[in-house]
Amino acid sequence: MVLKGRDIAKLLKKGEKPGTKDPFVITPHADVEEIAKSGSASINLRLGTWFVTLERSRMRAWEIKKKGEPQQQIARAEHYIPFGNVYLLHPRSFVLGITLEWIRLPSNFAAYVIGKSSLGRRGLIIATATGVHPGFKGCLTLELSNVGEIPVAIKPGMEICQIFIHKTHKKDSKYIDRSQFVGSRKPRLGDVTLDEFAEKLTLSQEGNP
Amino acid sequence: MRLLEYASGRINSVLNEIDQLEGCEFPYTHSSDALRKIKSSFEDALQYLKNCPEDPESAMDLCATSLGILFRCLPLLGFILRSTDVRNSFEVVRPLLHISEKLIKPRTETGKEKTKLILSSEWSYSPITYHEIPDLPGFVLIGLPAPESENPLLIPLSGHELGHALWNVYRLKEHLKPKFQEEIVNYIMNNQEEYKQAFPSISQINLSTKDLLESAGFPTWQHASIWVLEQAKETFCDFIGLRLFGTSFLHAFAYLLSPNVSSPRSVKYPQALKRVKNLKKAAVKYGFDIPDNFEDMFKDRPAPFLAKSEKFQLTIADNVLEKNMDVLIDKAQALIREANIPKPNIEESRRIYERFKLIVPAEKCKGLADILNAAWKAYNDPNLWENMEKFEKEKEKFEKKKERILKDLVLKTIEVFEVEHILKGDA
């Protein structure tokens, strides 16, 4: 079930109350009354102040490592763009951004993050890993790319994407998101390793024609 | 004239360096403003050299004066460069600037200079500030040790560095100097035997206050005067940090400075345990909690290598400082009250801490100090996020993750605080 503005507002209000054990939080957020009145089935999220770009380096290629192997350090640059300043996203360029909002999903809610059509029509795409699992806590990393023809000036604080909240069937606090991305205020690349399944497939064929 | 060519060459090299630095990504304009001001000082120096008279003596003097800027400003350029480092806690800059403006503005505004803040880092294991920089009027420069520049838990120590700016702006040295000198002379008059042992050459003279105050006597307590003023400045700065940030200042102080016995005691600071006792006294007077076992974390440093006469002067400085402790505690309190900066509130920091327990930034915070006090409470809570711990196989890995999450959570709370501040129209 997707929540509508009124339900989201109710949850946010409840989450603000001291003593709530597993609260739903989006902070900073717009006026709760406005969210309730909007009638929309999503809530807009804003662009944060931290960005990460990947840089060309001597590294031949990025490779997925086996579990336990040290991760390759990818050359990257972090940028802090304070409110009132802009980040220029040039055509065919890619940057990791982050939501201004810190989100906490209770253990019986999941979410999807989706771009805003008005930005997409101008070439700004917020892509890929859009699922947010129950129990997630932190800011959401956004993969921003400009597939259009003109540079786009993006500003921290602007509405950049929207989040749809879903209620899951069963509340089970044992099985909540404990990913490496929990509790981050900066965009993070995270570690990527082969899982057991893929590792078996890879190992069995290594050295074979 | 070679001398002029060499001097101009050195200044031109710095100007070329500044041209490179201007291409850096400055998150806040105050760093680039400082760079522009320093550039203009170097350009002025170059201009003086161009207009140098031909006689060699004047040229020598002019070169020496013009090159003074090199030694004054080169460390500042490094400091400004490091202010662009993304490991700095940029979220803290604006809230710290608001505090600096409130504290310093009343005085600097009369000098028509707005308060500007540069937060940076330093490659030495000590927080640092640069004060009384003629090239940068109105600027407050605060640097944390580079490996800790991303650690918001140490932000309370910036209060000590802000204290240095206050000490200068309010000309406290000039205010306190006559009182201290009078007390130094009184001390000597009351301890004449010790004085004569420290200065055997004048042991035959019948001491009088007049003799001591005149040029013949002054060199015998000149160091005591300098040292007590330096000690008073550092002690006052500790009290400013404490009054601004409450118990979190004591935690940050202990984190960074305990126990430090690597080098002998500096005559510019009270002995380590004395400094800790002074802080405890001020904390009681201001109504702040003192962390458990705070004093036990410190040890006195080895005594400095001093001549007998200097040892005696250090004893005088320590005694005069002790007599004036309440004056300094009250002065720090009065300046912060005048600036209308709210006192850290225990209830408020408890509320914020409860949000941290849920891994959620707190909203509607009343001040930076409350956030930092809550941060230390969370940091020192062995049971924080114990539910999360159950799912981590390695204790060490969990501790590392916990620390990263807490730091991000604190900095996000500070950003939310700033966003709310802007939306209210206070910024």
Image: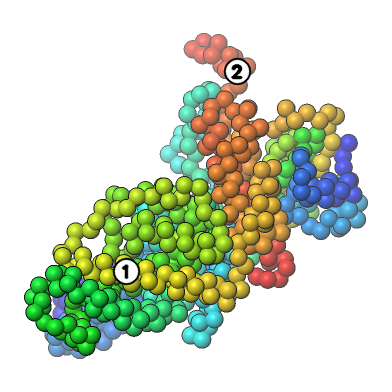
Neighbour class for label 2 at 10 Å: few (<14), some, many (≥20)? Answer: few
Q: Chain of mark 1?
A: B
Q: Amino acid at mark 2?
A: Glu
- Horizontal side of B293 relative to A156 (left or right) equals left
- Horizontal side of A100 relative to B276 (left or right) equals right
Color style of the picture: rainbow
Callout 1 secondary element: helix
- The residue shown at (50%, 57%) is B249
- Horizontal side of A112 relative to B87 (left or right) equals right
Q: Amino acid at mark 1?
A: Asn
**Residue in the foreground of this view, choosing between A45 and B343:** B343
Residue B311 rendering spot, x and y as whole percentages: 21, 65
Q: Which residue is mark 2?
A: A196
Q: Quadrant of the N terminus of chain A?
A: top right
Residue B24 rendering spot, x and y as whole percentages: 46, 61
- The residue shown at (58%, 14%) is A200
Label at residue B319: 1
Question: Does label 1 lie on the same chain as label 2?
Answer: no
Quadrant of residue B216 in the image?
Answer: bottom left
- The residue shown at (42%, 58%) is B277
Quadrant of residue B64 in the image?
Answer: bottom left
Quadrant of residue B221 in the image?
Answer: bottom left
Callout 2 secondary element: helix
**Residue in the foreground of this view, choosing between A48 and A102:** A102
Q: Would residue B203 be visible to someone looking at this image?
A: yes
- Horizontal side of B143 relative to B191 (left or right) equals right
Which of the two marks, 2 or 1, is nearer to us in this view?
1
Label 1 near label 2: C-beta < 8 Å? no
Residue B251 rendering spot, x and y as whole percentages: 49, 52
- Identify whether A3 is placed above or below B126: above
* Marks 2 and 1, how far apart at CA: 70 Å
